[in-house]
Amino acid sequence: MATQQAPARTAERQAFYDTIAPYNLAPLWEKLHHLVTPEPVTQCRPHLWHYDEDVRPHLMRAGGLISAMEATRRVLILENPGYAGEATVTGSLFAGLQLILPGEVAPAHRHTQSALRFIIEGHGAYTAVDGERTTMQPGDFVITPSWTWHDHGNESAEPMVWLDGLDIQIVKLLGASFAEPGAADVQAVTRPEGDSFARFGHNLLPIDWKPEVKTSPVFNYPYEMSRAALAALAKNGPPDPYHGHKMRYVNPATGEWAMPTIGTAIQLLPQGFASLSYRATDATVYVCVEGGGETRVGDAVLNWRPRDIFVVPGWAAHTHHAGAESVLFSFSDRPVQEKLGLWRESRGNE
């Protein structure tokens, strides 16, 4: 497709632009080719963070430099190199790795940003959301809905690390950021652990319950159950040539994505699987949960192993190649794009 070019800039035209600038006016025809592009243009770059050798040592060092209480949230930001200094992993979403050491508490607060936690390391720490605690295990997907009180604590004997994903940039764009600290560091527990899953996690809903928010009422999706679903799917038929065996996390009350602004999915790539080329407009963050392989994005080859995290830019053709049977968790802004009628995909040579 031909690229639009700006009209020639004559001396007379430049004098006009200089005249209108003090009035906070500017000519669209000078900017149109940058604002309305034939295809997506992004600063996002493919990038891989090796957890064990590159990230974990620095995260543990941070644990000795600042407490979870002092930091409020002890997190190392996963910053995309295309957005240096902007605290974003894709341009629309935030990602970071949070550390809670034994005996620590990350104090209660709430904010309009929605957050996901994907557990990377450790067993037995908890997240509390609006009066209910859930104990977290590696591979669990945990939701903190917008404007809900939440705190974290580690009563185990080992460090706990999870990946945080938030819609910070989306909320910032819309000018809708609010935050409030809790009255106490640890919120009161008002419901037994597992209550939300008992009510909403078994293909059943309380008889007269009506959803009041767009986020799933289930706030912990255990990896054990997700993994079992993938294994059953793999036994029942061949993998999709582009995604392997891939499933999305859903809100059981609506069938929509589990979160209104962040789409989350999990996929199984059989041993030796090589996907066909695929691209979509949502830049996507991946975590390797099991196995190992590589993702090729243009000239970039991202070799991933368990607990590694990588990002694929939007509208970038890519392929996945699994050496061993592998599981990948992923998240993106796809629900927002779908609601706005903007999301599209291209398979193979489309």
Image (tube, rainbow, N blue to C red):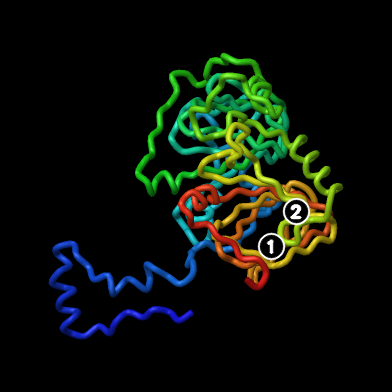
Q: Which residue is mark 1?
A: 302
In which quadrant will I find the C terminus? bottom right
> How many callouts does the rendering have?
2
For the point 47% across and 67% down, the residue is: 41
* Disc 1: CA contacts within 10 A as few (<14), some (14-19) or many (>=20): many
Percent from the top left, x then y, of residue 94? Answer: 51, 47
Residue 179 rendering spot, x and y as whole percentages = 40, 32
Q: Taking 263 as reference, is 323 left or right?
A: right
- Above or below, 240 against 70 in this view is below
Q: In which quarter of the view is residue 273 placed?
A: bottom right
Residue at left 45%, top 23%?
A: 182
- Position in image of residue 154 (x %, y %): 64, 26
Inspect the image, locate mark 1, and give the three-letter code of the amino acid beneath it. Leu
Count neighbours of disc 2 (C-alpha within 10 A) and say few if under 14, some if 14 to 19, many if 20 or more: some
Check disc 2 and report the residue beneath it: 305
Looking at the image, residue 67 sits to the left or right of residue 205; the answer is left
